[in-house]
Amino acid sequence: MFDSLRRFIRKWRASRDGGHQLDALLAIADRTAPYPERSEWLIELAHWIRRGHAVEAGAAAAGDNAHHSTPTHTRIRYLLHVLDRNPVWKGNVAGILRALLRESDGLSLLCDAGMPVHSGFFGALFERLEAALIPPAPNRRDLTAIVTLMFSSERDAEWIGALPTDLLIRIHALFDYAADEDEQRDTTPFSLDLLAALHNLTCQISSTGLSQTVRSRLGRADPDERGSAHAHRDRDGHAAHEASDVRVAMEKQPFYRLTRAMLAVETVHQAFVAGGPQEPLLHEVNYLRLLLDECRGATDNVFAHLYRNGVSVDIVFQVERMRMRIVRAEHLLNAWMAQDDPHAGARLTAELVNANHASQSVAHLVRSNFSLLARKVVEYSADTGEHYIARDRAEYLKMLRMAAGGGLVTVVTVCVKFAITGAHFQAMFEGLLAGINYAASFLLMHFLHFSLATKQPAMTAPTLARELDGVGTPAGVDSFVSSVTALMRTQAAAVLGNVLLVFPVCFGVQLLWHALFRANIISPEKAHATLHSFSLWGPTPFYAALTGVLLWSSSLLAGWADNWFVLHRVADALTYNRRLRMTLGAAGAERIARFCRANVARVVGNITLGLMLGLVPAILTAFAFSFEVRHVTLSAGSIGVALGVLGKDALKLPELWWAVAGVGSMAILNVAVSFALAFYMAVKSRDLRRNAVRSLRGAIWQRLFRHPLELVWPAKAARAAR
């Protein structure tokens, strides 16, 4: 069956000239060949168009606008030029193209190409990896499979959408060249395929929109309208009016009216084909456009409801796929109404090729899922992060006091950490104990309203992301820059408050311990090893950056926990729990629900951060590479203990000052890495373009040059107000 194609491939490989390759390819085109052979021929033709060698200058210049064309357009122009000179070849090529549309399932391409199938990330990932390893066979009578094999590059949509008018006219003419009566009788007009695809899509959109998942999140009818409906029913007293109320309520849903509008378009279209006037058809099409626009607005309302009341991946998947179907229906409708415009078909083809490629791209899957995760985490960390930004002098001084309290608690954490490491437990058990120590300290700081400096950036970046919504105006940019400046100032205050308290107190605790018990918290050898491990000349900066990643990861888990709590309405379940109400009373159950709602994110974040700081180094050291936690506050306290053990002679040791420099690098990298990752996620959640991010960065630098002292001390209220 494929002997002629194999002969062609051998002949093509032996040829060096692009024109000779095309001649060899066109010479074996056979409109009567079996479907798989014709499909493979088309795939090879598409490869020549996309990757063919340069054609002869004289032949490529055929056509008035050839000098304005891209290389791909030039090859298509040369192809049409060769076909015009060889009517037999042209008839075979035209017959193959018509047979492809006649014998392949086009609805799969028009309706399903680019539409996600799996709601889970790993299910979609495995599906795309499988498709990459096992591409579709050319004998599948599926237009999506042929398009996948013909256009495998993401750039194909660009040159298809940019095809010039003269080439589009000639390509359309090629499809109709030398068509016999049998072909015309058996071929379904493309307009009917578009209409069938529109019907399919509107049914799918309506089905999803009327499901309980979406319907319950669209909002309820206007109370005044419901009241007037009830009054109307009471006045007449007939059961028929109840059904009428139901119909009125359903008519308010655009998803309910969408399918009926599509049926009306089909009915009027049949009358128009039979010779009816065009005005009713235009009226029905415009009404369908209006309903599609209303459905798009309804999906925005669903997303707004989700972000207020908890995000479910499955629900977001359904609503996002419904939105994609709405956009696809609009594209099909535009192409159907502009059949006389050759560019309409090119735009639709480019959109289908682009969507089909995106549905098979692993990179696109990662980007889309990361954007969804970013939006999910950002929305539920913003309220928490606002707590960590000091915008005036009163809040600034309050942050200093909170940071000092956090440093005081860290003193105990450092001493317990040295006790755990001094016991020389097995590495994994030691990591578990260290994680419990860190988690307990972080929880104590939280409930005492103290602050740990490096925990703030991961929580405050989402707050800044919320302000990104207003950066389209000068006032919004100024507000965003003010928040960034306040954040930098707050971070400096928090780090300063932590370190200035934890270092001298740890130093004093070591001296007091030695005076009372005639012993040191750690041995002199351990003190020297501690200073050496914190040296700037070593892995300290790398470890500090990885610690910043752990700080950022804890904010993800905190955002997930807050979202889960809201999505499943755990607060309501606690408020109305029968046993809690019987034991504590209604007011007590409500207080517990409010307490859990206010603290769930921070408690989960603190516990997970503590356990990660203890266990992740042990796990990575055992299975991957050596890693130790380098946290600025904990390390500053450790240096204080080591200095107390070594005494004033340690001031002459270079390793002490290199360790101090290492702690400085920890302060920068802990904060910078965790904040950068969180802010990157925030930017991705807003789909902000690079130019906008670059302009914001410039605005921040301008503010710092104009008012550098704002980094260390808040401006007066009057200036802040301006």
Image: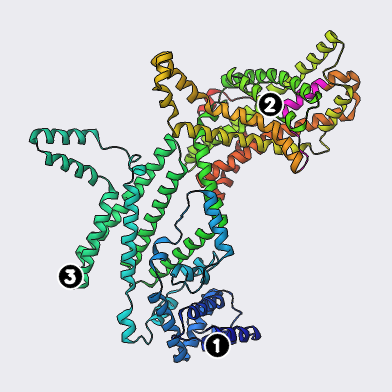
Q: What residue type is labelled 1?
A: Asp
**Residue where numbered disc 1 is placed:** 23
Q: Is residue 633 magenta?
A: yes
**Residue where numbered disc 2 is placed:** 495
Q: For the residues labelled 1 and 3, say whether their Cβ atoms are less than 8 Å apart.
A: no
**Distance in Å between CA atoms under marks 2 and 3:** 78 Å
Check the image and report above or below for 677 versus 427: below
Residue 27 image offset from top left, x and y in percent? 52, 89
Label ID, residue 276? 3
* Mark 2 or mark 1, earlier in chain: 1
Q: What residue type is labelled 2?
A: Val
Q: Quadrant of residue 233?
A: top left
Check the image and report above or below for 445 versus 1: above
Q: What residue type is labelled 3?
A: Gly
Query: 330 or 2: nearer the eye?
Result: 2
* Number of other residues with Cα within 10 Å of mark 2, as a class: few under 14, some 14 to 19, many 20 or more: many
- Closer to viewer: mark 2 or mark 1: 1
